[in-house]
Image (cartoon, rainbow, N blue to C red):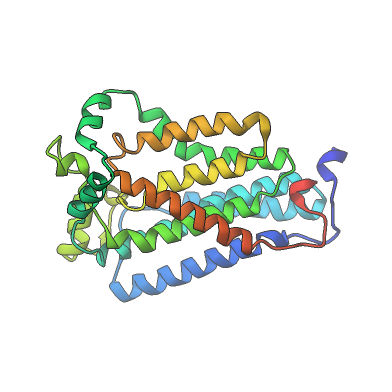
Amino acid sequence: MAGLRQGYTPGRAFERKARNIYLFVVVELAVAAAIYRALGLSFSNISLALPSGAAFLFLTSAWLGRRAGFTRVATWLEATALLFIQAAAGWALFFPATVWALPYADRWLSAADQAVGFDFPSLYRAVRNWPFRTIYHSFDWQPPLIILILVLARRDVWTFVLAIAVSLVMTAVVYPFAPAIGPVGYYGLGPVGSWTHMIDAMRDHGVRVISPKMMVGMVSLPSYHTAIGVICVWATWPLRILRWPFVAINAAMIFSTIPYGQHYLIDLIAGGAVAVVAIIIAKRLEVNDPQPSTAGS
């Protein structure tokens, strides 16, 4: 119990190092609300009550826990809550971005791949039946697991969460400039991606009501899976025992985005660039707190 209470600062509920993440989320939500109002966007049959309630419970528990001195537990709860809150806030920006999306960019995306000698059809035919599903969806559990690992290892967790938040917003900004039907459909290897129905509806047919069936991954360039993979490797690299396992997991995940996620190679390159820029921005925005760090307590 004493170890969990180490680093207690009396009367302090909020972690100062998290303030840029809170600010980032508030700005995201404010911008999203303004754009949704201007475009007449709304949700149908999508309830935010459960996730909102869970986030509120996590944050309240974190604030109370920190006041009581359980700083490491509070850090884990708060960072995990902010991870999912920023994801929801950032994801909300993709729908207005879809309204403004340019025509499908498969022609120049495929040309970029061919320019560097990448042959998607050959690779796809060779690996299309490989079991990529599990490793592809490691994208979902890696960030919250890494938050827990960083807290237990007494490492800074806030720069990691902020880097993820920045990378998501960067992805939302770039995405409408290069939407795609995907290489599988473009090369005639199978049907076009299901996300094209959502893009066509919002961009070309004036649909402004977002239904559950429209909650699909729609981004081609940059590959957000790749961005998250690079950020996860960067966050775990200082941990010797976990460095290479996470390198292997994320190398496999990033590779799976080509055949399973239907990405062009140029999408992955752009996703890697987004990750590098997001990490640089997050590190520059890192808050230097003279008080004891919750990550190290």
The relative height of residue 14 versus residue 185 in the rendered view (above or below) is below
Return the residue nearer the eye: 246 or 140: 246
Q: Position of residue 7 (x, y in %)?
A: 84, 50
Residue 239 visible in the snapshot: yes
Q: Position of residue 54 (x, y in %)?
A: 55, 49
Return the residue nearer the eye: 267 or 139: 267
Residue 57 visible in the snapshot: no
Q: Is residue 220 left or right of residue 277?
A: left
Quarter of the rendering containing residue 103? bottom left
The relative height of residue 252 versus residue 173 in the rendered view (above or below) is above
Q: Residue at x 48, y 42 (%)?
A: 229
Q: Residue at x 23, y 52 (%)?
A: 180
Q: Position of residue 156 (x, y in %)?
A: 69, 49
Q: Is residue 135 left or right of residue 187?
A: right
Return the residue nearer the eye: 286 or 119: 119
Q: Residue at x 79, y 55 (%)?
A: 67
The relative height of residue 142 versus residue 14 in the rendered view (above or below) is above
Q: Residue at x 41, y 50 (%)?
A: 271
